[in-house]
Image (tube, rainbow, N blue to C red):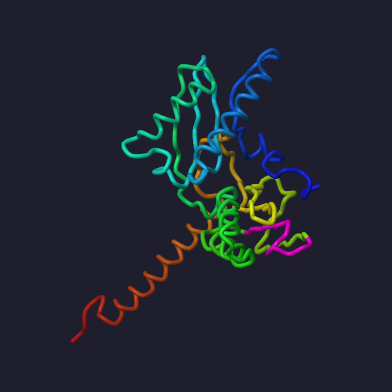
């Protein structure tokens, strides 16, 4: 079951929020859904090298608010904000709405974002870098940044072989059935001269032990487990410093030498 259900959709309403936030009745629901899909398709094609992780769409009182989560905000903003203004005008023509607002949120740790990791592997494969090397580098970077586990599965004519096959790389723990586990998932493609290669990425960021804000634009930073581990490391570092300082005091004469 865990391998068949999308880990993101499986956790909606529990530890993750929806990326489209609006209400519609039966008459307008289908129209808005198609429009959301067109906006995301257009932005991903328009900013194909912008390191886009996800696009959150909100509608309030006739206002369209689009929030782009990216690891390269400078590419989207452009010089003096000119690129954002051009994208805004193009979206107004696409949607037929006059009130369009674009927000840009920077992803501080792209090594822990499944979409960006998958896109990085795909770009390297398209540039004829060995798929094993690209995947192992991405896994090492994610674990170094604090991920509890990562799994990458590649399918297709790997390395240009005649027969398509699948290969899986995994390190750490990725418990797909545990709903409180914050697992990010992405499915991307690498378009090579010998066909498409599918790349699936699962990244486990740790357990969510407290109630989380389900707003998809909420940048909570690190999971509860990572925060707890860092606090423990910080306390351990302080204790080590205290012990070292205590030794200096004993050697240096905390109370002075008696005569």
Give x and y (percent) for residue 73.
Answer: 42, 43
Q: Magenta stretch?
A: 149-163
Instruction: Name the residue at the top extreme.
Output: 27
Magenta span contains residue 116: no
Q: Quadrant of residue 9?
A: top right
Q: Which residue is painted at 64% across and 17% down in the image?
A: 24
Work out which quarter of the rendered image holds the C terminus and state it.
bottom left
**Which of the pair 144/82 is nearer the observer?**
82
Asked if residue 182 can be seen in this view, the reply is no
Q: As displayed, is residue 30 above or below residue 143?
A: above
In-image side of 151 versus 221 (left or right): right
Give x and y (percent) for residue 112.
Answer: 55, 53
Asked if residue 84 can be seen in this view, the reply is yes
Q: As displayed, is residue 220 above or below residue 151?
A: above
**Which of the pair 219/258 is nearer the observer?**
219
Q: As displayed, is residue 145 above or below residue 185?
A: below
Q: Which residue is painted at 69% across and 63% down in the image?
A: 160
Instruction: Name the residue at the bottom extreme.
Output: 259
Give x and y (percent) for residue 35.
Answer: 61, 24
**Which of the pair 65/1 is nearer the observer?**
65
Give x and y (percent) for residue 107.
Answer: 47, 46
Q: As displayed, is residue 28 above or below residue 13?
A: above
Instruction: Name the residue at the right extreme.
Output: 1
In-image side of 36 versus 7 (left or right): left
In-image side of 188 versus 240 (left or right): right
Q: Which residue is painted at 70% across and 45% down in the image?
A: 7
Q: Which residue is painted at 67% across and 53% down in the image?
A: 199
In-image side of 190 versus 81 (left or right): right
């Amino acid at each position: 079951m865990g391998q068949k259900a999308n880990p993101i959709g499986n956790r909606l309403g529990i530890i993750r929020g929806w990326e489209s936030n609006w209400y519609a009745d039966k008459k307008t629901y289908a129209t808005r859904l198609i429009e959301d899909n067109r906006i995301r398709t257009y932005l991903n094609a328009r900013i194909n090298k912008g390191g886009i992780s996800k696009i959150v769409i909100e509608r309030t009182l006739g206002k369209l608010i689009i929030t782009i989560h990216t690891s390269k905000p400078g590419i989207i903003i452009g010089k003096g904000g000119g690129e954002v203004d051009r994208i805004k005008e193009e979206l107004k023509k696409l949607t037929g709405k006059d009130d369009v607002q674009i927000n840009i949120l920077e992803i501080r740790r792209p090594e822990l974002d499944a979409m960006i990791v998958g896109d990085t592997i795909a770009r390297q494969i398209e540039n004829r870098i060995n798929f094993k090397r690209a995947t192992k580098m991405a896994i090492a970077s994610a674990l170094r940044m604090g991920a509890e586990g990562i799994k990458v599965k590649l399918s297709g004519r790997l390395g240009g072989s005649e027969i398509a096959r699948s290969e899986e790389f995994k390190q750490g723990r990725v418990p797909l059935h545990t709903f409180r586990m914050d697992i990010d998932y992405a499915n991307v493609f690498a378009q090579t001269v010998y066909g498409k290669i599918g790349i699936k990425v699962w990244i486990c960021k740790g357990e969510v032990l407290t109630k989380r804000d389900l707003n998809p634009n909420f940048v909570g930073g690190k999971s509860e487990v990572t925060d707890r581990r860092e606090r423990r490391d910080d306390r351990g570092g302080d204790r080590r410093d205290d012990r070292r300082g205590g030794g200096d005091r004993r050697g240096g004469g905390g109370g002075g030498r008696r005569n």
